[in-house]
Amino acid sequence: METNSVQQMTTIVKPWQAGIMLVNLPIAYLYFYLVTKLA
């Protein structure tokens, strides 16, 4: 039972993590741009 719930969690988390990465990419780029401009 527990292994099945863990497998379901991983299938839910994987696309969720990919979505977070896609959201963080422009944020990190913007941060890097601001740092280089201010430095």
Image: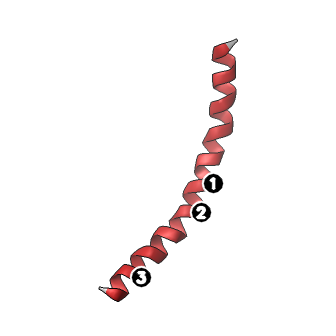
Is 21 placed left or right of 34 in the picture?
right
Q: Which residue is mark 3?
A: 34
Dot 2 lies on which element?
A: helix
- CA gap, disc 1 and disc 2: 6 Å
Q: Residues within 10 Å of mark 3 (few under 14, many from 20)?
A: few
Residue reaching furthest front?
Answer: 38
Camera-nearest label, 1 or 3: 3
Quarter of the rendering occupied by the N terminus: top right
- Indicate the amino acid at tag 1: Gly
Asked whether, in this view, residue 5 is left or right of residue 36, the answer is right
Question: Within 10 angstroms of label 1, few (less than 14), some, or many (20 or more) residues?
Answer: few
User: How many dots with numbers?
Assistant: 3
The part of the image, by quadrant, that contains residue 7 is top right
N-terminal label among 1 and 3: 1
- The answer to which image quadrant residue 19 occupies is bottom right
Q: Which residue is mark 1?
A: 19
Q: Are marks 1 and 2 in contact (CB under 8 Å)?
A: yes
Q: Can you identify the residue that label 2 sits on?
A: 23
Q: Viewed as shown, does residue 4 lie left or right of 29?
A: right
Q: Which amino acid is tagged 3?
A: Leu
Q: Residue at x 46, y 73 (%)?
A: 29
Of mark 3 and mark 2, the one earlier in the sequence is: 2
Residue 10, image x, y percentages = 62, 32
For mark 1, give the secondary structure: helix
Residue 32 position, x and y percent, is 40, 75
